[in-house]
Amino acid sequence: MIKPALGLLTLLLVLGGMSFFAADAQQARRLEFDRQNLKQFFAEGSYDNDLVVDSYLIPANSVHPRLVNQQLLGLQRDRLAYRARKDGQVVAVAVPASADDGFNGRVDLLVSVDMFGRIGAARVVSDVDADALYGVVDVIESSWMEEFSGKAMRNILGVTWTSISAEREYDQFVGASITPKAVAGRIYDALVFVQSNRIELIRGESG
């Protein structure tokens, strides 16, 4: 009876090890997916750290003890903010946000902001109805969203839905169950959030 029991134990250990390594490989792929897509949010050569490692967890349904104005982000699930560093100094932060409107829909955003309060990039990312923190930076291409780059808080609301023609993705935004005006408003709120939490976002522990 001892030998069959040892054989079964060995088989279970092997299967467990295979499952562990498979999960580890999948996690590595998800991290690399985000790592590559995050390059769109920060200028090439402007940072030298690993963005997916130097991230900051922002909870959706609980109050963070060191953050204020969390409601400005409109998050429906926990998401990560990402810090870009150059020579150890934070040069920009990408914060998540979610925008809702009267179509029973939601669109997830990621907005990078430099230390002068200017937007590096604002993008719509694929809405993932899951609790996953990694493998979720799936950018939806939009030339209209590129108009936010370089904008600061004082002029962000000047980028509105009026700049979108039938040929410039209006249908895409309706299809995503969101209005461009709501997107512009949420990006403005994200800038306010960054200004309100600048020190914590820079110095807080990686999540």
Image: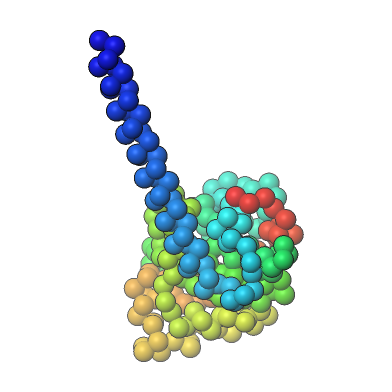
Q: Nearer the viewer, residue 195 or 18?
A: 18
Q: Position of residue 40 (x, y in %)?
A: 52, 73
Residue 101 at least partly seen: no
| x then y, percent, for residue 126 | 41, 65
Q: Is residue 51 visible?
A: yes
The quadrant holding residue 139 is: bottom left
7 vs 162: above or below: above
Quadrant for the N terminus, please: top left
Q: Is residue 198 above or below residue 160?
A: above
Colouring method of the image: rainbow
Q: Residue at x 69, y 68 (%)?
A: 86
- Measured as percent of width and height from the top left, residue 18 is found at 34, 39
**Closer-to-camera residue (193/89):** 89
Q: Is residue 28 left or right of residue 198?
A: left
* Residue found at x 52% / y 67%: 38
Rendering coords of residue 15 (x, y %):
32, 34
